[in-house]
Amino acid sequence: MSRAVAEINLSAIKSNLDLIKSKTKSQILAVVKANAYGHGLIPVAKAAVESGADWLGTALLEEAIELRKSGISTPIIAWLTPLGEDFRSALEMNIDLSISSLEVLEEIVLASNQMNKVPRLHIEIDTGMSRGGVRDDWERLFIQVGELVKSNKINLVGIWTHFARADEPEEQMNSTQLSQLYDRVSASEKIGIKPEFIHIANSAAALTNKQSHQSIVRWGIGLYGLSPDINSLGSSKTLNLQPVMKLKAKLNLVKQVEAGATVGYGATAVTTKDTKLGVVAMGYADGIPRNANSNAGVFVAGKRAAIIGRVSMDQFVVDLGIDSLAKTGDEVIVFGDGSAGEYTTDEWAKACGSINYEIVTRIGPRVPRIYTYERT
Ligand SMILES: *Cc1c(COP(=O)(O)O)cnc(C)c1O
């Protein structure tokens, strides 16, 4: 094994897709943005398509283009579309685009006029995130879209929005957002632009709010076997999700130190008794959070060993304990599904004030991904 590797279990991708398919009749869009949440764009996308995903979704158009270049012909939506993007490639490659403004609509239509292609568009509505999506000037956008649809200049494929608080299923805001989406859809129908697809649900909504499923469910974190929110929805295990990524590394060095040894930059940690330390060959350059504390660590030689001292760029140190049998060169599990006793991404997230999404997504390009097919 190299000094660090992320094992990506593609059988777990299938299992997590099967799970959501068993819970809904809607089409499933596998969200593969950000290098498939750090798991590797193309292998994950191919596994998702083979396992029956109806759509793929990316944030960036570049990501969608990469998918097409790898030979994937499944419908794809790219939903982050600033002005000046490569819309010609999107049109050539049959990539659906989301629009939130007249400006972007005009630019896409201009590109399509030059190419004699009809763009496939989804209007994003801002129903409370105040992020992407059209808000106050939705009527002007709808009127313009209506005219372009009538003259066959565009194909309005979908209308969609995004939940702000789907991981808090009891929140009133969820139904407010859903009903605002309904309002916009009926307004669009009044001006004769009936979209084929309505979509709003992310993983949390897909798991907790059947009414939100509509025509497409956008299955993101759940595809990777992680819980959208362990406090409100429970862990991967309670949700029957299988974590896809297992992060492993090597112990560069094992050494014995006396009580009172200072560890790492700033000498922020001091050993309280004689112990063995393990130096793990990963650091914040690889996506190990610098502010992780001793509530995270690694699993080695049959036990957990907690972080001691600050995480550095390429290394961090764990306290193995004086009786540890770990040796220089041993393999450690940084995180996994927890079944062997290893830390989970949820524990890592807690140890640095983040969420499991960020833990997996930030595992960097220096860490090779290895694809496995382990059935559990
Ligand atoms: C990332 C994203 C999702 C997926 O969210 P999860 O919580 O990971 O399921 C869905 N829709 C949009 C627009 C997104 O950006």
Image (cartoon, grey):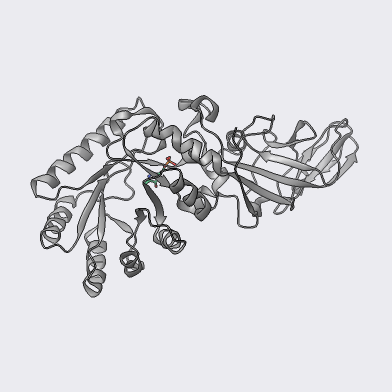
Q: Is residue 39 left or right of residue 20?
A: right
In the image, residue 78 above or below residue 92: above
Instruction: Report the image quarter containing ligand 1.
Output: top left
Q: Is residue 360 left or right of residue 320?
A: left
Image location (x, y in percent) of residue 198: 25, 43
Q: Is residue 166 visible?
A: no
Give how far across and how far down residue 23 sits, in percent: 38, 30
Of residues 68 and 148, the one drawn nearer to the viewer in this rendering: 68
Q: How many numbered marks are there?
A: 0
Horizontal side, residue 305 vs residue 336: left or right:
right
Residue 32, relative to residue 182: is it above or below? below
Q: Residue at x 45, y 32 (%)?
A: 19
As rendered, which of 41 and 140 lies closer to the eye?
A: 41
Quick one: quadrant of the C terminus?
A: top right
Residue situated in front as seen by the camera: 247 or 44? 44
Determine whether, in the image, residue 122 is placed left or right of residue 78.
left
Which residue shows up at 48% across the image and 53% down it?
34
User: In the figure, 37 relative to 350: above or below?
Assistant: below
Which residue does the image show at 41% across and 37% down from the upper left? 203
Asked which quadrant contains residue 305, the reply is: top right
